[in-house]
Amino acid sequence: MQKLTASRNTGIDLLRGFVMIIMALDHTRDFFHQSVSTTDMLNPATTTPFFFFTRWITHLCAPTFVFLSGVSAYLASQRRSLKDAIAMLVKRGLFLVFVEIIFFSLGLSFNPLYNFIFLEVIWAIGVSLILLALCMKVSDRFVLGVGIILFFGHNILDYLSISSDGVSGALWNIFFLAKGSVISYAPGRLILILYAILPWTGVMFMGYSIGQWFVNGYPPAKRIKNLRLLGAALLVMYIILRATNMYGNPVPWENGEHPILSFLNTEKYPPSLQFLGMTLGPSLLLLSVFENVKSGWGRIVQVYGRAPLFYFIVHFYLLHFLCMIMFFVSGLPLSKATESFMLFRPEEFGYSLPVVYLIWVLVVTAMYFPCRWFYRYKQTHTQWWLKYI
């Protein structure tokens, strides 16, 4: 069977760039905001609309990023034989896990001894790519079937009581739960697993399964219609499930003192079905609109979307470097620098939310020219490692 060809879709680049920009707000808050913890920002009883929105809007990022990784995996596979596509996905998956452990963990902690290793979204994408490669050996329909089961069915586990002790418990946490799971692998050395694998694998598989909408020759009008129908369906599903508390989120909606905030407060770790409907629904609707954006702001945002991994890693180092500078400027003693797993980020350090927004704007602006340079570098160079970034 002849493979369909695929070209770069500007809507995908624009949506990916959009969520990458928003993602930087969440990470800037992690480094520079003092007043309210992440948990309290989403707790209707302890937050304000400004605090809540700052955290909530960034929920769009991880599901969209993982979903588009699935779409990109499909498009990349169309340029290769099945054997080569599988090998490419396995190598890229292993490469992403390596990047998460070596580069991301260092950028987040600034600890060259690696006492803390963080496994977050890049790790989930990497392992999911490997699982995708294995399922592709069967068929694309098999990928879709597994994706549907994982995407819509993983919240059935909310009704089960599973022991988290021992090796089996650790594996259960890694693959299904992973809400801040901690594994001690040596004295004074910890692995913090924040992203469970399989719920995110379901998101990637669903993205891969609609990748055929983006190949050359697929009618753009039909693609836009499909995206709008799927996005609207996910939003309607979320609203119905949330309003009725039937299924799809471990914590029910409470029509109490803060009904709107409670309605929007769905579970990300691991991502519940309601969370995925709430986030991917709007993202797919945006994707249906972004394809036809030709304005200057769209071309600027696309620059970030064309160098996503480069942006992801470099902006962490930039944020932590700025955090270190502000730590010394604040006059805190050096002994405070090691109080947290994020060096130079003690609990009493931080600024108000408006200052966080200002730093976010400056960091995103500073990342524009490096991202543009890196994308152009990829276009004109052929080193082996470039195809994995």
Image (cartoon, rainbow, N blue to C red):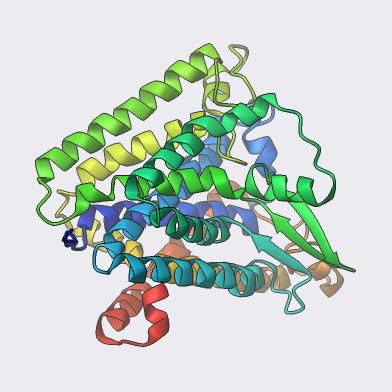
Vertical comparison of 1 with 385: above or below: above
Q: Establish if 182 lies above or below 107.
A: above
Foreground residue among 55 and 125: 125
Q: Nearer the viewer, residue 54 or 98?
A: 98
Q: Indicate the quadrant where residue 55 lies.
A: top right
Q: Is residue 381 left or right of residue 153?
A: left
What residue is shown at x 52% (from left), y 20% (from top)?
A: 260
Q: Residue at x 44, y 67 (%)?
A: 309
The foreground one among 143 and 366 is 143
Q: Give residue 303's quadrant in the image.
A: bottom left
Q: Which residue occupies 40% across, 46% down?
A: 143
Query: Which quarter of the figure is the C terminus placed in?
Result: bottom left
Q: Is residue 162 left or right of residue 52?
A: right
As drawn, 7 above or below 245: below
Q: Position of residue 139 (x, y in %)?
A: 35, 50
Residue 339 in view, yes or no: no
Q: How far across and down, in percent of the image, does residue 231 sit?
A: 31, 33
Q: Residue furthest right?
A: 187
Q: Position of residue 156 (x, y in %)?
A: 60, 27
Q: Residue at x 35, y 55 (%)?
A: 16
Residue 247 seen anywhere in this rendered image of the structure: yes
Q: On screen, 138 above or below 103?
A: above
Residue 283, horizontal then vertical, whole percent = 35, 41
Q: How many marks?
A: 0
| Direction from residue 340 to residue 199 in the image, left or right | left
Can you say which quadrant of the picture contains the N terminus?
Answer: bottom left
